[in-house]
Image (spheres, rainbow, N blue to C red):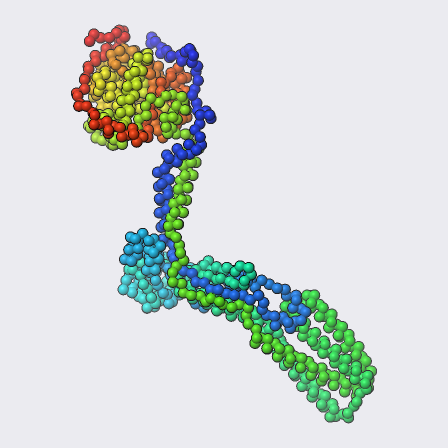
Amino acid sequence: MSSPIIFHDYAADTGRSLRFMMPSSEAQPPLRRRVLRILGRHKLLIIASFLLAAMMATLHALSIRPMYEATMLVHVAQSGGKEGRALLGDVAGMFGNRAPASTEAELVQSRSLMAKSIGNLDLYASAEPEFTSLVAHPGANCLARLRAMDLAAFRSCLWSSADIVIARFDVPPALINQDFTLRFEGDGAFLLTGEAAGISAHGRVGQLLVAQTSSGPVHLQVSALSAESGVSFRLRKRSALTALQEAQQGLRVNEGRNGSGMLEVALRGPNPVVVNALLADMANEYLAGSERRSTQDLDRSLAYVRDQLADARRRLQEAETRYRQFRNGKATIDPGEDAKTSAQQLASAKSQKLELEQKRAELLVRFTPNHPVVASIDAQIANVNNEIRRLGAYLRTLPTLEQDNLTLAQDLKMQTENYASLLTMARQLGLARASVEGNVSLIDLPQMPERPVPDRIDVRAAAGGAAGAALAVLLALLRGLTQRRRIEAAADVERSVGLPVYVSIPYSARQATLAAPRRREEAPPLLARAAPLDAAVESLRHFRATLQFAMPQQRNNIVLMTSARSGMGASFIVSNLALLYGSCGKKVLLIDADLRGCGLAAYVKPTREGGLSELLCGAQGMEGIVQRDVMPSVDYIAAGQHCADSAELLHRPELERLLKAIASYYDIVLVHGAPVLEASDSLVVGAQAGAIYLVVRRGVSDEADLAETVKRLRFVGLSPRGCLFNDARAAQESASYPQRYARFWPARYAPVVTRVDVPAIGKNAGEKRAE
């Protein structure tokens, strides 16, 4: 019956208690230090993000076609059209005052003005070069500017190297706003293709090209084309709304300060000729429209008065004819004074009524019949009608002949006064119409832009790079502050779990070369053999010296090297440490107790099959598993064949008897254990070891895993002596020390190889064999 394995009761030791070294809030590093560490760990990511974002911003800036801007200056008078409103008398005060500059600014930006100018110039066809084809076929001048690193000049040269003038481009309605591609083939020839139209037709500059499609014929005539061979243009026949919307995106109207009435109108576009022509046509249309708006009231009033004047002339002629016929057929009658007075009052009332009706007609041009001003005129007309009826009733009491005479005389007088009044009004309106000018004047005419609008490509690149770097910093901080905290320095180990760090092993570029894939028959890549002056090897020598002085205080000479998880470098450290011990004449036994991972197989070349797993299951004896002199004075026990019940094998008593029997035959027994958090093997092996050391790797190990590893070891009564900090950042002095020290490196001597006779495991396993 096998004897059970007895663990050391750590909690019963005097002066010690079972406590777990977990990170506390007081021991946490300041936030500023944590942020700096995170940024330092991700500095390559931040730099790469900055460069990539700056490059993308530069390419985007180069792909934007240079814009040209044409401007004009307009002055808006503070008053206008007073002549027309003066004719309305007191009604003119009801129109109110308006802010001319703001109103005119809105009129300039109206769709009707620009749409009319686009129609006048027939700007519905658009053609622009494709950026990819320009980059693929740059001219010699553009390449020279690119070599000079003048990106702004390179962009201007690149886009100005291709120019096309479309004389005619007609497409069926179904192909409106559809893209066509025109590729210049040199010597005046081009190829027109359209995916939506399904066409591919060849044409020449100056000739009309007619291509048939399923929707109808496509007519294209290119009057001029200047570009490198292979450059492509994107053609499109735009609808009226699309052309208007694209043009309005470049329109800008700024009003002057302090009510100066000045308007600055600017129009941007990729073609300077089109921009200047469009803005000039808009200026002409705007001035003509402003003049029409200023005189439209006078024009309507003058037209109405002229119509009334013709009708009044006709009525006056008829009244004169009737009165003359009556006087010729009848004797002359002299009515009484009372009748004359009544007749004059009746004529005056009728004249007043006629004036009121004319004023009402003019008001109906602007107001509805229910407006208070029109209602007031209607009330006056009603009063005049009452007076006319009263006087008419009085005159009807006179004799018939006298009534007829008075009526004809009064009608002639009324028609004469009405005609004279209308004639005077027509003359006044004509004079006012001739003297009226628009309240808008053009100060600065549009000029052809010679240079594009300044666009700082370097500023765009810097802004893009800053945005990319800021995003990388944000992601790095978000990841670093929310994810599990990685160990970046030896101080983090001492702070988090309270264990001392015996040595910091710097990163070795030579080890990275040795760890590259190799052929199976090559020698194992041990750094201590290939580069004995490497800083990492020198650090292991420091640990060897420290371990040598600590051995007498241990209960045995068995040292277990393990880690929290795989990939920390425990197999690298223990294999090179075994070589360093053997190089100084020590008898060393190296055991791979990681029965699942077999980590030492990558560093120690096996000389035979079989290992620890075969010994524990009874398949082989001691002499069959110990591999002699795999390194100078170093014997090796491999892990053996992989088996599913490796944890059960280590619980067998053969492991305890093996270690007790074999430890006295060697100066040191180095055991490579499985990761604590991935397997329980190291907890079983650690009960037989005199010292346990944990391997921590910078940037890979995290504090939570390390604390959990220490806690699990202490749960079973095991206490690790300390840690080895692997892959540390080497300081400038320590990194250069081995190179300086190489000048004093003594001559190499052949290593002393001592053969050890290993006893068989049996009843007398604890006794040594006679040497």
- Could you tell me which quadrant the N terminus lies in? top left
Residue 131, placed above or below residue 745? below
Residue 74, placed above or below residue 299? above
Query: Is 758 situated left or right of 33 in this image?
Result: left
Quarter where residue 474 is shown: top left
Residue 336 visible, this angle:
yes
Q: Please give the name of the residue rendered at 68% of the width and 84% of the height, measured from the top-left corner.
A: 316
Residue 507 visible, this angle:
no
- Could you tell me which quadrant the C terminus lies in? top left
Q: Position of residue 277 (x, y in %)?
A: 43, 66
In this rendering, the count of numbered labels is 0
Q: Please give the name of the residue rendered at 61% of the width and 76% of the height, measured from the top-left corner.
A: 429
Quarter where residue 98 is shown: bottom right
In this view, the residue in front, 719 or 443, is: 443
Q: Position of residue 549 (x, y in %)?
A: 30, 15
Q: Position of residue 599 (x, y in %)?
A: 29, 24
Q: Position of residue 544 (x, y in %)?
A: 28, 20
Quarter where residue 762 is shown: top left
Q: Please give the name of the residue rendered at 24% of the width and 21% of the height, measured from the top-left corner.
A: 580
Q: Please give the name of the residue rendered at 34% of the width and 56% of the height, measured from the top-left corner.
A: 153
Residue 212, placed above or below residue 354? above
Query: Is 254 situated left or right of 230 in this image?
Result: right
Query: Is 302 situated left or right of 474 in this image?
Result: right
